[in-house]
Amino acid sequence: MQLSKDFERFRDGLPRPLESYVLTTYGIDLTSVYGGLRVKNPFGKASGQLSLARHQVERDAASGLGFVVLKTVIAQDRRGEQTMREWAIPETRMLVEPICGRSGERGWTVTWKGRGWFDSFAAYLELFHQALTAAEDAAMQVAPSVKYHLPTPKENFWKEDEYTFTTQALLEVWKRHRGEQVMPLEKDFSPTLAGSERAAEQAKILEWLGTVPRLVHRAAPGQVHVGLKIFNALFEDEFQLRMLDAVEAAPPGEERADFLAYANRLFDPAKQFEGKVGVAYGGPDLSGRNLAGLERFLALESDGREPGRVRERLPVSATGDIHSGRIAAEYLVRGASSFQMHTIFQLPDSEFTMRAGNKTDKALHQILFHPQDGFLVWLLDLGERFGLKGAQNVAETAAWCRDQWDKIIEPLSQ
């Protein structure tokens, strides 16, 4: 089998250009979309401590990632004040450890105390500039991640100046590199937010989801694609569906997000790490909840619960326990057109087959070419089962899966 041969053949280095090789050899077009922009392949690095320095972005660009989301910066107003400054905590230590899900499936999780960008806002703008510079020749996309003010249940105001100042400052850097091209930007609803008093009321969370896109769009009309990184709330799963529905159902225009990132890590309010009680975690339970939520949401859409209602579906960038091509494909058939990874880049070398290269090289080799769990074998199987056209790219396949969900769910579950 060609995949088995290539998996062994590329243990010492991936083919370049990667996307051309895959298209020529397997007839699979890896191009997709993230944040309204074309990406050469759908695999990216999620915001975190692995995307806070220039050398990290340079390495990812050289290895062939499709996109990188930078570490989350805490928004500030023109006076330098930050209402969410309690999230500006530096990482002191990270712990990579095995984890066993409720189903018995084993996986990995990374634990750390840090939250958002801890350095100055000026330093973040410089990082954004350096990242765009490093990514340009490799045709890799780069997006900032921002934590703007979110009012508590006791507050009835929004610090709009944080939205205006921070967004416009980031856009100025973007324009120096990309001109008038629309800038993708993720609004981070972090997993630690789930354990905060800010997220104690469902009505307030729904207010956030409805207000944030409008404030970002107003800061730079027509110049920013706003992505909401939905968090896993501590409420029942039904509320996850309410959040998805609220974002999808927003009226077209400035009040509607442009894409979704779904969904970041779970939060355990009782778990302790280095003296801190309440930390986020990943692993099989995370992908299990995320996939089940997207599946239920698609099922509700296909049921036609609101006859005559037609709405344009938002692109989804999946994140959460994407440690193999199989998990990425599971997100794909639930409508995700790009995949953000994090923990996989910190796994020990013993978890990879590739002998050479850095963790990004090894992750791409494993995710794409593994003959059983690789993304390519799953796409080939999807094409054979449902007669998909070879020229269809990943974004088009994701859209097809969403449109045909009621027809493919049963065969895929067998």
Image (spheres, rainbow, N blue to C red):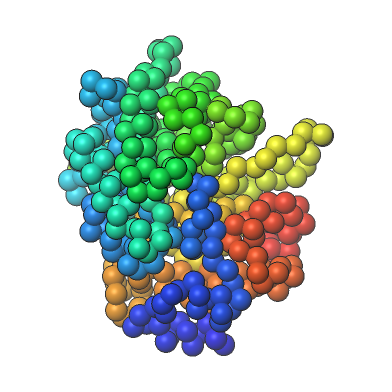
Residue farthest toward the right in the current orientation of the protein: 307
Residue 30 sits in quarter: bottom right
Up-down relation of residue 369 to residue 162 (above or below) = below
Q: Quadrant of the C terminus?
A: bottom right
Up-down relation of residue 214 to residue 366 (above or below) = above
Residue 23 x/y as whole percent: 56, 75
Q: Nearer the viewer, residue 53 or 326?
A: 53
Q: Quadrant of the N terminus?
A: bottom right
Q: Nearer the viewer, residue 87 or 148?
A: 148
Residue 306 sits in quarter: top right
Can residue 236 be seen here?
no
Residue 215 x/y as whole percent: 46, 25
Q: Name the residue at 69% across, 63% down.
A: 412
Up-down relation of residue 348 to residue 273 (above or below) = below
Residue 188 x/y as whole percent: 40, 37
Residue 53 x/y as whole percent: 23, 52
Locate residue 150 relative to residue 307 in the image: left or right: left
Up-down relation of residue 82 to residue 42 (above or below) = above
Q: Name the residue at 29% across, 46% down.
A: 128
Q: Name the residue at 60% across, 42% down.
A: 314
Q: Nearer the viewer, residue 404 or 236?
A: 404
